[in-house]
Image: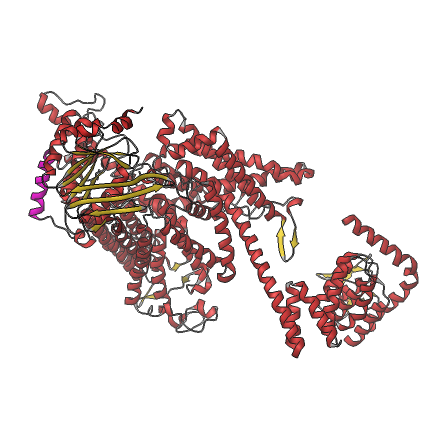
Amino acid sequence: MTVLRVLFVLVGLALSGAASAQVDDEAIRATIARFADSKNFRETEEIVRDLAATGDVRVERPLSALSDGNLSFRKSDRQVFIAPERGQTATLFDPLTGEAAGEAPKGDFTKVKVNNSLRRTIRDVISGLTLASPDPVVRLAAARTMFIAPDAANLEALDAAIAAETVTSVKISLEAARASTILVSDAPDAAKFDAIALLGQRGDRETLSLLTGFAARSQGDLQAAAQRAIDTIGKSLALWDIGQNIWYGISLGSVLLLAAIGLAITFGVMGVINMAHGEMVMIGAYTTFVVQSVIRSSFPGLFDWSLTIALPLAFLVAGAVGLALERGVIRFLYGRPLETLLATWGVSLILQQAVRTIFGPTNQEVGNPSWMSGGFQIGQLALTWNRLWIVVFALAVFGLLLYIFKRTAWGLQMRAVTANRRMASSMGIRTPWVDAFTFALGSGIAGIAGVALSQIDNVSPNLGQGYIIDSFMVVVFGGVGNLWGTLVGAFSLGIVNKFLEPYAGAVLGKILVLVLIILFIQKRPRGLFALKGRSVEA
Amino acid sequence: MITQRLFTGGSNRRVLVTALVLAAVAVLVPVLHLALPPSSPFHVPAYMVALVGKYLTYALLALALDLVWGYCGILSLGHGAFFALGGYAMGMYLMRQIGDRGVYGNPILPDFMVFLNWKELPWFWYGFDQFWFAAIMIVLAPGALAFVFGWFAFRSRVTGVYLSIITQALTYALLLAFFRNDMGFGGNNGLTDFKDILGFNVQAPETRAGLFAASALALALALLITSAITRSKYGMLMVAVRDAESRTRFIGWRPENIKVFAFTISAVMAGIAGALYVPQVGIINPGEFAPANSIEVVVWTAVGGRGTLVGPIIGALLVNGGKSWFTGILPEYWLFALGGLFIAVTLFLPKGIIGTWDSWRASRRDAAERARTKAEEDAAPPPVDPATGRPVRVEETPRAPSPGLSGGPAPQPAE
Amino acid sequence: MSKSGTILYLDGVSVSFDGFRAINNLSLVLDRGEMRAIIGPNGAGKTTMMDIITGKTRPDAGEVYFDGTIDLTKHDEADIAMMGIGRKFQKPTVFESHTVEDNLVLALAGPRSIFPALFHRRSKAESEHIDEILATIRLEARRNDLAANLSHGQKQWLEIGMLLAQDPKLLLVDEPVAGMTDAETEETARLLKDIAKTHSVVVVEHDMHFVRELGVKVTCLHEGAVLSEGTLDHVSADDRVIEVYLGR
């Protein structure tokens, strides 16, 4: 794609430059020089239009500079430069080629004055120019500009461009731009009806605001037609909005799932409330940070692999911390869930402070590898790669755990201990061993969740605190001892949260979710997928 | 054994002694602060009055938690919410007392409302210019919240760690809510810049001394009341619910009612503590709702010994004194110390200071008594440790922590 | 079948947990003043039946009536306890951090709301009643000891004492002699027979020796339904009972 674009630009330059550049250069420079003598905005505008009339793509540079307020002339010889100022000095560039021309004190220069209407003219002129650009990307951008800010003066240029256009996607954009331009022109009503019909097919937000503006200043049948188109677009947008909210909800749900699933394991199997669970997530995120730091300083080429390297490391580091925590503290507190809660809270304070002492209290920079940055659009749905990968990753982790639980001997032992600890122990299962490794597994999963979260959240010592209550809500909501409950709990909480947000705002939405969960627990004190029967309360 | 009776007698005496000490402190400290010149070695400096006054309100909060946790087995991780609600009720009264002396000089609206371009006082601020109204709200706001929350939670038999997590979610939700500017409670910055309380300048030494005395007396009174509650038949029921909830149910009591009552009383105590806290520190902001604050209260109670009433008071004073001292010399290590304290108390001192002291004394007395009876029967000398010359301590208590002092019922992994 | 004259009336009761039928179309009638022994192998539904009667578990189908008129499925545990059904658990459950005497005080019949409890003063009548019960369950000497320090058998007795203090019309007694010595077992049988003179009693027990000593009508449960009913001799001669207990 990039290669192609470079090729286009090169070919374009060769075509437009080689043939006429030398001849026109002097003429263009002469026109630019007139800026120094311009007495008012009207004259400046005339010069702008004259520049545009040359049809040379290169005039975009001085015009943009003018629009940005960077075009100045030297008081001594009235020569025009692009001269952005920093402090008391101005850096000089040639207005046509953009070559650096040294520095000079700012006081030696006078700016060519510009106002908003002039800026608008410049923008339109530039897009008109770029319509003729040989680079389809540039043409597409020009079409978009003209679509958003239509100007009746562009109509002819657009017609010509559409006739000449060979790339389908660009042509569609050009036609939309033409339709939007027709709506602001004095074209006959029939043409406007066609334009409305064409725009009505599009259904994005810009079209909506365009048509709304048109409906406001038109009357009769035209207004009615525009209104109908607005309604159609509104309906389709509402659907897309629901889709977008569901996507946001799934994205939040996958984050919750990652944070909560390790907790669900330790809580479900061992009945242990691990308040330091969030800190395991944090440790995973810091492991990612350390891995990236080492890669940045020693093996910069491996940066795209940083997460792949960090995953097993985070699992091991967090798992080891979890194992130490279980062996050192928790195993002395079995059967005393409330004490376990307090002791692990103490551990979480210590871990937070330890990380703060080692890495400092500020956020650490964790970068996205190239395959996780950016995003793409499906219809009106905006998706980012990092969120998409996290959803995939969360589901993969879930699937892996499900496999461990249902298909391996270790999983069988864990389930046996969950169902009946005493019986399992008398069947020869070494429950302390199962406990220790289950806890290590839960912590390790939290660690790899930290790797994922480092991609979308600030990596700071408080990272874990932000997730702990939400994770508990997921586990409580989904029901203990059931991985599917955690999955359903995470995604439903995520989606409900995101659906409430537009109506109630982020904070109030969160509060509402908490209240809903408290009410939900009234109905089902043991969660969505609760174990039933006599054994529960025995 | 017989020591059980002596033991309760002992704890009753301890409550009386503590209440008397608190009453004496309530008189002595203000006198030493106001009457003696700063040069005197017995002068209590102003910062000390403010600091200890603050600790006393913390102690009241810990006592409130002890009532529900120590006696009723409800580990609330949201008691800071009730404390903060009481504090906000008091803060609203103090805000209204500022009148037109605020930065914007608006006689009705507090500064932050003027700043947010509010035109009139929200309805829930009405009445807070009257102290009696604020006093009612200090009791009512936390009490009503605790009643409604408890009624829902206990009726559906949410117990153990589930309940703890839900209480934590409660205070977390309130934290988020009070951070919002449009809630009308000052948002991020909370309520501050107080001027008067009941017509006295909050900064004046006399007012500070008065607030100190009020805190000490409130604590003493609360101690006597909770002691009376725990010694009543209702108090016995609370312990019964803690140890064997279903047994209580099957002899016809409703554990949910017993719990709701305890939870509400406790929340009211916490609210009063918050109301006394705010004028002494001069600010109340949403940070008081932070879950970490509430859980810190639990460690004060645990350090002193839950289910002992006097223990949590001692725990709150000790831990907060330690915190002030520690943050003075090694500020960045305080969280290490606090975290270590959580672990150490649960692992090594599950009964807390007072609880451990009591069981040590009880076992000594039992051993001595058994030795004496044996001596009378056998006419032989009691077994004596050759090294110390003391009667040998005979291990009698079961190995598992006595249910009288450990939190909930038997292990329930499914919970 | 008429409900009048019965203290307990179960008809067509079923309940299942996650597809497992713990009680399957169970019918059982207990007359006023009757004592009944219930036997059955593990998992026969004995404890679940108790749960249904005391309101802990709601049946999926069937009628459960107390005293001929009260529909027990419409009430919860505390209500049912106040109507006069006392229950002793399989695992002795007493308030371990209270003294023996305080255990009885809490169980004593009387108002069950907060404020009377808060300002309760023990009356002379109450004290006498407690002395009486302590004599019945033979724990006078240990009245001031913590319940936690009682032996297993003594805890069982204390729990029965608490039922008596509650003054119920019907007592449900789940495995009262589990873990008792022979002497204690005999003592318990005598105690229960004594109680049965003035109360209706349902005893669930595994110990056949003990059941024989009670000398009452026996119901054998199996897989949540009544397998056989009659005297112990009749029941133990039943082929199906032998099959269930001994296997094929």
- Majority SS type along the magenta span: helix
Would residue A133 be found to the left or right of residue A388 on screen? Answer: right
Q: Give the vertical position of B334 relative to A110 (above or below).
A: above
Would residue A305 be found to the left or right of residue A76 on screen? Answer: left
Asked if the stretch drawn in magenta spans residue C133, the answer is yes
- Judge whether residue A282 can be spotted in this image: yes
Q: Position of residue B219 (x, y in %)?
A: 26, 53
Q: Give the vertical position of A522 relative to A437 (above or below).
A: below
Q: Nearer the viewer, residue C21 or B178?
A: C21
Q: Residue at x 68, y 64 (%)?
A: A201
- Judge whether residue A81 can be spotted in this image: no
Q: Over which residues does the magenta segment extend?
A: C123-141
Q: Nearer the viewer, residue B57 or C170?
A: C170
Q: Position of residue A265 (x, y in %)?
A: 45, 38
Considering the image in quadrants, where does the C terminus of chain A appear? top left
Q: How is the image coloured?
A: secondary structure
Would residue C130 be found to the left or right of residue B356 on screen? Answer: left
Q: Nearer the viewer, residue A249 or B211?
A: A249
Q: Position of residue B267 (x, y in %)?
A: 30, 54
Asked if the stretch drawn in magenta spans residue B89, the answer is no
Instruction: Please tell me in which quadrant of the rendered image residue B245 appears.
Output: top left
Q: Residue at x 70, y 61 (%)?
A: A87
Count of marks placed on residues? 0
Q: Give the vertical position of A56 relative to A273 (above or below).
A: below
Q: Position of residue B271 (x, y in %)?
A: 31, 57
Would residue C193 be found to the left or right of residue B127 on screen? Answer: left
